[in-house]
Image (spheres, helix red, strand yellow):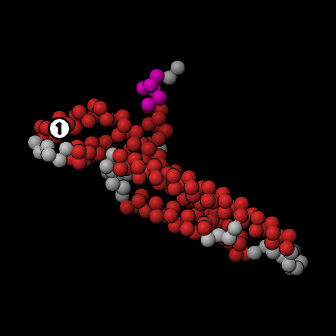
Amino acid sequence: MATIAQMELELLALQAGGIEIPGLDFDLIIAKLVKIKFPHIVSKEEIDAVIKSYTDTAKAMINEEINKIKSIVKQLNAGIETITKTVAMVISQIAAGVATSLAGIPNPGIALAAAMDAIQKKGLLQSMLDVLVNLCIQLLSSCIKIAFELPDAIFGLIAVVAGLNTLVKTIPG
């Protein structure tokens, strides 16, 4: 039977995924949280005491959010890459048109099959995008929870997801 400590180590290993995000560091985050939550404390001794208190009580929660953020960013990158390729493929198939037979004669059966295929692909793309939108929501929630300001490059992923969502809605079907 796995102990809690073993499970926590495995969870950290699975969530981190080897992604480094500037500023996403426990010590930096804890110092910022203390400044935000206790702006009235000015002496270094008091600040250090509050930081130590938070370090003892909130370390697991903060580290969990840090690893969640890293994991989500990794998933967003992979999802955006997959969806971008798939959208390009679907659009090129629609643009090419396959509504003729091999002899070049219009074939309504082939046109219908192509339309149904486009509808299925659009539905799949929309489902994939719904997952990415949910990941964006989780990412923002985790960042807000620990007062972490996303770097512009990572925040830009959210705009990419929104753009892909708009693009998929323009696909016929």
Which residue lies under the disc numbered 1?
A: 48
* Amino acid type, residue under disc 1 in the picture: Asp
State the residue lying farthest toward the bottom: 105
**Residue 141 pos. (x, y %):** 41, 49
> Residue at 31% of width from left, 49% of height from top?
147
109 displayed left or right of 77: right
27 displayed left or right of 165: left
**Residue 21 pos. (x, y %):** 38, 51
Report which quarter residue 9 is drawn in: top left
> Residue at 20% of width from left, 37% of height from top?
50
52 displayed left or right of 135: left
For the record, the magenta segment spans 3-8
**Residue 100 pos. (x, y %):** 84, 76
> Residue at 42% of width from left, 42% of height from top?
67
Q: Is residue 120 above or below residue 52?
A: below
Q: Does the magenta run of residues contain 6?
A: yes
> Residue at 47% of width from left, 54% of height from top?
136
State the residue lying farthest toward the top: 1
Q: Is residue 18 visible?
A: no
Magenta stretch, main secondary structure, is helix
**Label 1: element kind:** helix
Q: Is residue 70 above or below residue 1?
A: below
